[in-house]
Image (cartoon, helix red, strand yellow):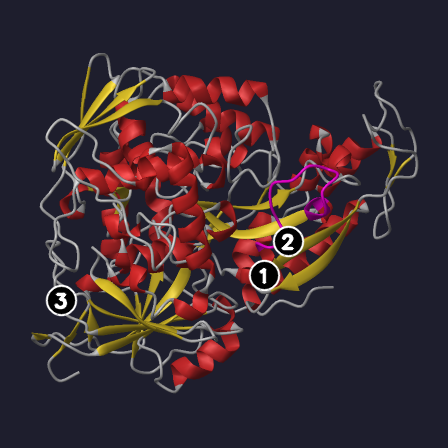
Amino acid sequence: MVKILRMSLSLCSRALYLRNRFSFPRKAAVASAVLTVAFIAGCSSASSSGTSSSGKPESGGTVTFALPPGTTPTWIFPFVNSSQGTIVNYNQWDLQMWRTLYYMGTPTSPDVDYSVSLAYPPTYSDNNTVVTIHMRPYKWSDGTPVTSRNVLFWFNLLRAEKANWWLYVPTYFPDDVASFHIVSQSEFVLHLTRTVNPTEFSQNELLSLTPIPMSWDRTSLSGSAGTGSTPPAGTGTGLDMTPKGAVAVYSFLEAQSKDQTTYATNPLWKMVDGPYRVESFLSTGQTTLVKNDTYSGPIKPRIDKIVYLPFTSDLSELSALRSGGIDIGYTDYADVSSPVPGYQLIPWPEWAFNSMWINYNNPRVGPVFRQQYVREAMQSLVDQTTIIKDVYHGDAYPSFGTVPLKPASPYQTKYELSLPFSYDPSRASALLTGHGWTVHPNGVTTCSKPGTGPGECGAGIAKGAALSFTLVYPSGNQTTTVSKEIEKSDFAKAGIVLNLDAVPLDSVFSDVGICTASQPLCKWQMFDFPNYIEYPYPYEGNTYGTGGAYNISNYSSPTFMSLLHAVLSYPGSSLPTSAIAEGNYLASQVVSIWQPQPYYQLTEIKNGLEGVSPQGPQTTIEPERWYYTSGS
């Protein structure tokens, strides 16, 4: 029996449930912005344990920023592979030093923020097969301009090492770029192999392009770098201009990024175009970023330093928070009934879905997971209503697919909104019994009728096979631990055993990933990933597409790939019906076991520190907007 702490809590997340009071046009940018602005406005004074200062903005000071339990920055090179694609690494750390060409997320919307991007909105021509991009006059920290050639440098590495890129989906970006043509220092053109959906291509594919310094175009710290010249109608020179050279340069930069002990001293990482750069990096994972005084973006940073503080658990973080040692921290749902003096409590919404990922290629349980009726049975044992009520105190919402149900958007489907496969232990047991399993409530359900015919367990499942799985989940968070215990108890009602294994999040990624059944890595069975941040235009090519670089479930479906192609090749800018069909398909197939979606965190902001809220639903942080006020 799971003992659950019950408490009364009223946060502004109730505004999320007012979705039906708004009407939304077809365009995603408008749709998501309208609701999120309304949501953020409601949150601005929703829950506070102190009084925020309204004094005059000041320049200077240091901000301490608490990292999630068991998480630290582990990757600095702004070319991320699937094992390093964490929110902290990419959204909250790397982006402070190197900005992507297009910035993902505004303070109130998951969409592209062109106002702070390094380039103007792209233009499309020739039946949406040609993309022209004009860059804004940004500069590197040494005063030299950020140019088209810097974008080409990153793109050349991507082409050579696409299999190592966390967002890669075969046949799509960068495979669908026939040529990258530099017109001038500030203009380049992509010639594509196919007609694209401009909205999707702008909001998803182009987001990844990242200018990087030509001083990195080398294979050793002591060697010389490529010249990177940009003649008006040429592509420049450099080691990266040949596939062999690009591979060698990537290998060098990858090796440098693995050496965390040199993050603060390596000359490579001192050249930035973002508002901050690394000043120190400790073995504990604590890192300090210092202001880039030559930052050329439209919002000049006021705060001198940002210190990222690691914690092993939310309890240790809360202790530091209550002592006043953190400027931006968080409170766990289990502790939120006790206000922290001197802080504002502001929930942080996110554009994400939440699920337990399953390994379709695990040699023992993979054949079981490949049976859709098993996945439907497992989904029917997730009591989202109870978890939302008793763990998140109403401040979360159900999740039954990859399209976030909050804030409302045109991408949502009637199928997901119908909340399919809701909690029903009787249905779960009937599904298993009807397919050849002998159900042992609070015991272990086993296969009694092996085979592939009607009423039998299915391909690859032997007689006596047991429904017993190991679920790995991040340690250090009370809320997560309680919700996993609830799920374990509920799964037992149909004789499905969940063996819980709590480990630090950073170490999970070394044990979970894309694999074949014969590889040692494939021993993992289930993985509870703490919220997957969605693209502005949601599609799941890299997470569930065959060959997708973040397809850690090893899922493969020709039907899904056909639907994906229809979405990405839609010739218009409006929402295609194929986008709805894609979301419907993944939800109906129960490709992962869906769980309630809470906030990213309940943020505590010290009084006198301004500009932190609103917090963008892409979970990026923008410290260039932060400042202290006089008298704080």
**Residue at mark 2 to residue at mark 3: CA–CA distance:** 40 Å
For badge 2, the amino acid type reads Asp
Mark 2, residue position: 511
Give the magenta-colored segment's residue range: 509-522
Q: Residue at x 12, y 62 (%)?
A: 294
**Residue 385 spot, x, y in % from top left:** 56, 50
Judged by its main secondary structure, the magenta piece is loop
Q: Is residue 54 left or right of residue 467?
A: left
Instruction: Name the kind of residue labelled 1 in the image.
Output: Ser
* Mark nearer the viewer, 1 or 3: 3
**Which one is nearer the viewer's eye here, 289 or 160?**
160
How far apart are the alpha carbons under marks 2 and 1? 7 Å
**Does the stretch in magenta take in 171?**
no
Circle 3 residues within 10 Å: few <14, some 14–19, many ≥20: few
The kind of secondary structure element at disc 3 is loop
Q: Picture coordinates of residue 51 (x, y %)?
A: 22, 77
Q: Secondary structure at mark 2?
A: loop
Q: Taking 501 as reference, is 154 left or right? A: left
Residue 282 against residue 244 in the figure, above or below? below
Q: Which residue is mark 1?
A: 507
The label nearer to you, 2 versus 3, is 3
Residue at (30% x, 55% y) in the render: 95
Q: Quadrant of the C terminus?
A: bottom left
Percent x, y of residue 292: 18, 65
